[in-house]
Image: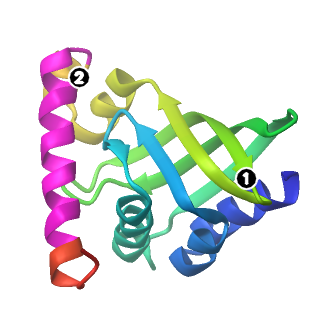
Amino acid sequence: MEELIEQFYRAFGACDADTMAECYHANVQFSDLAFGQLSASEARAMWQMLCKSQKGQGLKVEVSQIQLGTNSATAHWQAQYAFSRTGRKVHNRIVAKFQFKDGLIIGHHDAFDLHQWARQALGFKGWLLGGTSFFQRKLQQQTRSMLRKYMTKNNLL
């Protein structure tokens, strides 16, 4: 499973959403603070959308501290990129929890400091509001709307 996690993040660093999707079980569930809970098709589309927006933009992804359980794992990973809406540099540090089924990832939960991310991505506005539940709800509404539009435009619904 360690190699599967490493493959997933190598693919993300290369903006290769197809390889990332191959690491996921057909019924994968994904969640994080920015998008909330996503179904399998939404999770695959999210990575596709993120890879498309970052391709050629200098995305750097590193994974470390992979710890394996029986059918689970945790990993620390970080991404460095320019936030597309503002162009501001972001260095996000994430802890991922995985569950596995049939040799693939069936559960993927990313946790990170949303307030820190908001300060980097949005500047003063993120510093001021990034630690609030209002901000998290608003961010999830915006990201889910972007994802829905992306899925509609690309016939992924």
The type of residue carrying mark 1 is Lys
Instruction: Write down the quadrant of residue 7 in the picture.
Output: bottom right
Q: Position of residue 153 (x, y in %)?
A: 16, 82
Residue in the picture at 56% in, 78% down:
16
Secondary structure of the residue carrying tag 1 is: strand
Determine which residue is flagged by label 1: 101
**Residue occupying the point 77% across, 59% down:** 102
Secondary structure of residue under mark 2: loop
Residue 146 at x, y percent in the picture: 17, 60
Indicate the position of residue 130 as horizontal and vertical percent values: 23, 22
Q: Are marks 2 and 1 in contact (CB under 8 Å)?
A: no
Residue 19 makes an appearance in the image: yes
| Residue 152 picture quarter | bottom left
Decide whether residue 21 is among the magenta residues. no
Q: Please state the horizontal and vertical placement of residue 57, each as a whole percent of the image.
A: 42, 72
Q: Nearer the viewer, residue 70 or 114?
A: 70
Inter-mark Cα distance, 2 to 1: 35 Å
Q: Name the residue beneath numbered marker 2.
A: 130
Which image quarter is the C terminus in?
A: bottom left
